[in-house]
Amino acid sequence: MNLPTPQSIQDNIAQNLACEYITVEGDGQHFFATIVSDKFINKTKIQRHQIVYATLGDRMREEIHALSMKTLTIDEWKENNG
């Protein structure tokens, strides 16, 4: 089995979740994603992560060892990066 790449994970999330901004970094086993989407409005941190996990489906169980995330709404992103 090929190790997942940051780009393949980023593409997978972007294809299944409307994102204003997304970036994924990692080494083939451990990854960190920053995801900005208005789908996160009024969602708890856990709910936001569940949304992202759902976009990855079986990849979370079979390929990706660890995925840390920063999940923000567009307004939260603007506040932190404005």
Image (cartoon, helix red, strand yellow):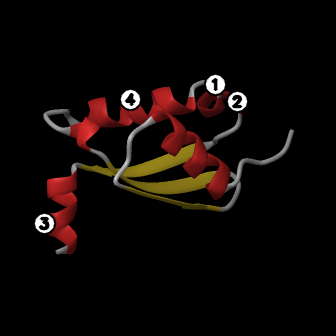
> Percent position (x, y) of residue 67?
52, 46
Rendered residue at 38%/29% (across/down): 50
> Toward which corner of the image does residue 78 lie, by quadrant?
bottom left
Q: Earlier in the sequence, mark 4 or mark 2?
A: 4
57 sits to left or right of 82: right
Mark 1, secondary structure of its residue: loop
Q: Residue furthest bottom?
A: 82
Discs 2, 1 touching: Cβ within 8 Å: yes
**Residue placed under numbered mark 1 in the picture:** 58
The quarter of the image holding the N terminus is: top right
- The residue at 58%/41% (across/down) is 12
The residues tagged by marks 4 and 1 sit, at their Cα atoms, a distance apart of: 13 Å
| Residue under the image location 22 percent in, 72 percent down | 81
Q: Secondary structure at mark 3?
A: helix
Number of other residues with Cα within 10 Å of mark 2, as a class: few under 14, some 14 to 19, many 20 or more: few
Q: How far separated are the C-alphas under marks 2 and 1? A: 6 Å
Give 81 or 25, whichever is nearer the viewer: 81
Identify residue for label 3: 79
Q: Residue 26 at what x, y percent from top left?
A: 61, 61
| Disc nearer the start of the sequence (3/4) | 4
> Alpha-carbon neighbours of circle 3 within 10 Å: few (<14), some, or many (≥20)?
few
Position of residue 66 in the picture relative to residue 73 (left or right): right
Q: Quadrant of the C terminus?
A: bottom left
Task: Select label 2 or label 1 by which is in front.
Answer: 1
Q: How many marks?
A: 4
Q: Amino acid at mark 1?
A: Asp
- The residue that mark 4 highlights is 50
